[in-house]
Amino acid sequence: MKADVELIDQSTKIMVANGHFILQAHRFADDDVSHAVRLMNWAELPPSARVIDLGCGTGAIPFIWSQMRPDCEFTLVNISQYQLDCCQDFGIKINCSMEDVPVDDGVFDAATCCFAIGHTDHQTSLYEMARIVRRGGVVFIYDMVPDAADVSHLSDLNYSVVSRSDMERMAKKAGLVLDFYMEPQNKGCLIEDQFREAYSRYFADVKPAIWRFTVGDWNADV
């Protein structure tokens, strides 16, 4: 799936105007900072890690992480220049697709992708994560899995989800070794009350999912 940058920019402007900077459908804690910290704890970033956040949104999550982990260096990737412009002034910013990041192989210790991979072709993005993270490094993904037979309505948001088994099959093909998978409890979303009808329409049939992988050896024949 090719990201619709115009749609991303339009929805971001609405969210930011209403004071929402974490553009995700789920919350795993009662406030934004605690939510970000919980994600960071699950990611288990290595000490003094060079971290690339793919599809960084407005940068709210990696900014909170950078305050908690000043030992880490952050690079923010986003296909939307508008979202990059909304980011705090920290780290390195690259305006590009996460499917084709203009960096050398293995230059990062960790790649994170929170609620963004569905704007892309999953397999292509997983290959790219495996390419840019060193062997033994971390790939952390927060996304969704279907909770119903048909979740094609998410295409209205220019987004797609795949099953747990499909994600893990594609990750294995890219050379990613599964550390753990979990489906954390959703404590609700700040935008749910404001856009209840739309939220229910698009997110009632999916549930949050977390994967943490270690980069192994690429194997296109798996």
Image (spheres, grey):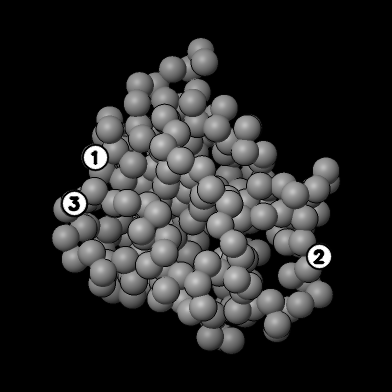
Circle nearer the N terminus (3, 1)? 3
Q: Residue at x 72, y 47 (%)?
A: 146
Q: Quadrant of residue 154?
A: bottom right
Q: Does residue 210 sit above or below 83 in this rendering?
A: above
Instruction: Point out the residue furthest to the bottom here.
Output: 18
Q: Position of residue 172 (x, y in %)?
A: 49, 26
Q: Residues within 10 Å of mark 2 (few under 14, many from 20)?
A: few
Instruction: Check disc 3 and report the residue beneath it.
Output: 47
Residue 169 located left or right of residue 81? right
Instruction: Check disc 2 and report the residue beneath it.
Output: 201
Q: Is residue 1 visible?
A: yes
> Which mark is in front, 3 or 1?
3
* Residue nearer the viewer, 145 or 160: 145
> Which mark is in front, 2 or 3?
3
Instruction: Check disc 1 and report the residue beneath it.
Output: 107
Q: Residues within 10 Å of mark 1 (few under 14, many from 20)?
A: some
Q: Residue at x 48, y 48 (%)?
A: 141
Q: Residue at x 67, y 39 (%)?
A: 163
Which element is circle 1 on? loop
Q: Is residue 83 visible?
A: no
Which element is circle 3 on? loop
Q: Position of residue 55 (x, y in %)?
A: 47, 56
* Residue nearer the viewer, 105 or 34: 34
Q: Position of residue 47 (x, y in %)?
A: 18, 51
Residue type at the position of mark 1: Val
Residue type at the position of mark 3: Pro
